[in-house]
Amino acid sequence: MSLDDFEELLADKPAHEKWELIGGRVVRMMVGARWEHARIVQNIARHLGNALDAAGSRCQVFAETFFVKQTEMEAATLPDVMVVCGDLAPGATSTDAPVVIFEVMSAGSEARDRLEKWHVYQKLPSLRHYVLVARDHPALEVFDRENGLWSGLRLLNGADDALSLDALGLSLSLSDIYRGVLDRA
């Protein structure tokens, strides 16, 4: 399916579904994730947003509601969290220029996040960090782009680790990402 056809089809999407277009294929998901997923997404968005605001940055954080569209790959995805730096057109519902993308992985989304979405995301010239977040234990897999080249994989494990995001000039602790999820009694 083309991106244009997908956008027309979205008008008829049932409210209880979330749709993405990946490589011309429509992926239908149910709205509503486990509370742990939602809490991790909220934590990432809140801590990133607060840090960017404190730094006086013009970058903006979006969580699960703003599309990344890539026309050449016939893709329209809804990342769990993304950071966009620079101006957005009034009324925009998508971008093709995220700087950082986070995907919180579940058993149902892990293969899609690791393979299909990564195939799309790595072709976005603006993207500097792609972060895969484990839902059930404190672990991140981070792909970084430096000087236009993807430099490999960083693995972060444990609540004492911190994620450095050089493109934003800030870091985010895993204890903040997983606050209220893994520290519950």
Image (tube, rainbow, N blue to C red):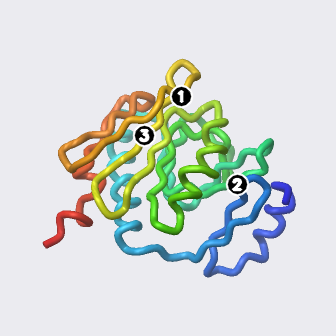
Q: Which residue is mark 3?
A: 142
Q: Is the residue 41 above or below the residue 117 in the image?
A: below
| Residue 177 position in % (x across, y down) | 30, 53
Name the image quarter holding residue 3: bottom right
Depth check: give the residue in front, 26 or 180. Answer: 26
Taking the spot 21% from the left edge, 50% from the top edge, the residue there is 159
Which comes sooner in the sequence, label 2 or label 3?
A: 2
Q: Which residue is mark 2?
A: 76
Secondary structure beneath dot 1 equals: strand
Which comes sooner in the sequence, label 1 or label 2?
A: 2
| Residue 1 position in % (x across, y down) | 84, 60
What separation in Å lies between label 1 and label 2 (alpha carbons)? 22 Å
Taking the spot 18% from the left edge, 45% from the top edge, the residue there is 160
| Residue 45 position in % (x across, y down) | 40, 53
Depth check: give the residue in front, 91 or 130. Answer: 130
Question: Around disc 3, counting alpha carbons within 10 Å, would you say few (fewer than 14), some (14 to 19), or many (20 or more)?
Answer: some
Which amino acid lies under the numbered mark 3 shown in the image of this protein? Val
Question: Around disc 1, counting alpha carbons within 10 Å, would you say few (fewer than 14), some (14 to 19), or many (20 or more)?
Answer: some
Q: Which residue is mark 1?
A: 150
